[in-house]
Image: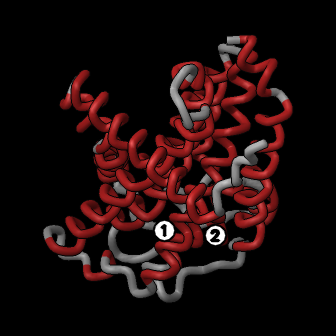
């Protein structure tokens, strides 16, 4: 009797990488095929939202809570917030649409989720680079060049990982409750006001801070800003808490998806 040898870890990883790259390229082609304009607008959404917020704050005479540039202060809050919301939303819809992978060799619903999440992460990284380059070179704000790039990159990646974990959990829930995407969308809009996008948490009253610090996105924003501002107040920042959210949500999401996979696919 012939016994088939199990593929080595290196071979399995190589196959997984090829699958993810193929899915990412397919996602890009599908977006470009349907509407290049809508795809471009989706990528530029953080900048459009930032422009609207700048217009509102300029109209009411609002100054930055920290630093000399309101545009930079808002940008360092909007990028982490949008990274979390966009990736978690894309991951959720990818898992809910996992039935599209039926009959496709080697491709599982989680592969589609990871491909969309990685693609969204790359796109948002490009948007962030363009935004801060514009603020630095065109608007003449020297602080827009990160003084500690490693902190900026670390915060961005941990926020993205947290978003993937939350997206997996939401995708499983959304497979059983179709309105969950709407509920999460409403929650996401309210999260904008709870994530320190346009204020410094340390400057808030203690009673408010005690509630705000439960929000992991707030810690992502705080961590991200420390890469731009050398003396940014960090009393509220807890990197371990955000890392725990990233690892915990991914682990819980994977366990939940595996435990309910059969029921989830049947419910589609």
Q: Is residue 202 above or below residue 8?
A: below
Q: Toward which corner of the image does residue 36 lie, by quadrant?
A: top left
Residue in the foreground of this view, choosing between 145 and 251: 251
Residue beneath disc 2: 203
Q: Quadrant of residue 111?
A: top right
Q: Which residue is mark 1?
A: 65
Image height check: is 195 above or below 219? above
Total marks in image: 2
Neighbours of disc 2 within 10 Å: few (<14), some (14-19), many (20+): few
The answer to whether residue 189 of the structure is visible from this angle is: no
Q: Is residue 193 left or right of residue 247?
A: left
- Camera-side residue: 23 or 142? 23
Query: Do the residues bearing badges 2 and 1 touch, measured as CB atoms within 8 Å?
Result: yes
Residue lying farthest left? 138
The structure residue drawn at horizontal position 36% and vertical position 47%, both measured from the top left corner, is 46
| Residue 257 drawn at (x, y percent) | 77, 35
Q: Is residue 75 left or right of residue 239?
A: left
Identify the element where label 2 is drawn.
Answer: helix
Q: Position of residue 105 (x, y in %)?
A: 53, 31
User: In this view, which residue lies farthest toward the front?
Assistant: 1
How far across and down, in percent of the image, does residue 185 sit?
58, 29
């Amino acid at each position: 009797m012939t016994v088939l040898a199990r593929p080595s870890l290196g071979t399995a990883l190589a196959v997984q990488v090829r699958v993810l790259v193929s899915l990412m390229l397919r996602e890009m082609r599908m977006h470009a095929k349907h509407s290049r304009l809508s795809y471009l607008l989706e990528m530029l959404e953080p900048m459009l939202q930032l422009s609207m917020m700048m217009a509102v704050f300029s109209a009411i005479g609002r100054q930055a809570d920290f630093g000399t540039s309101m545009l930079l202060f808002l940008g360092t809050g909007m990028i982490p917030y949008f990274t979390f919301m966009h990736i978690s939303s894309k991951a959720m819809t990818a898992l809910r649409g996992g039935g599209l992978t039926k009959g496709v060799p080697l491709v599982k619903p989680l592969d589609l989720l990871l491909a969309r999440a990685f693609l969204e992460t790359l796109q948002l990284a490009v948007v962030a680079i363009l935004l801060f380059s514009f603020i630095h070179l065109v608007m003449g704000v020297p602080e827009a060049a990160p003084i500690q790039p490693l902190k900026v990159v670390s915060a961005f990646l941990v926020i993205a990982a947290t978003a993937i974990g939350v997206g997996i959990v939401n995708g499983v829930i959304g497979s059983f409750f179709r309105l969950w995407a709407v509920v999460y969308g409403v929650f996401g809009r309210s999260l904008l006001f709870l994530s320190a996008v346009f204020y410094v948490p340390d400057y808030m009253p203690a009673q408010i801070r005690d509630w705000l610090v439960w929000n992991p996105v707030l810690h992502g924003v705080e961590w991200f800003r420390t890469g731009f501002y050398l003396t940014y107040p960090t009393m509220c920042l807890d990197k371990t808490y955000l890392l725990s959210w990233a690892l915990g949500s991914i682990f819980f999401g994977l366990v939940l998806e595996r435990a309910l996979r059969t029921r989830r696919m049947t419910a589609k």
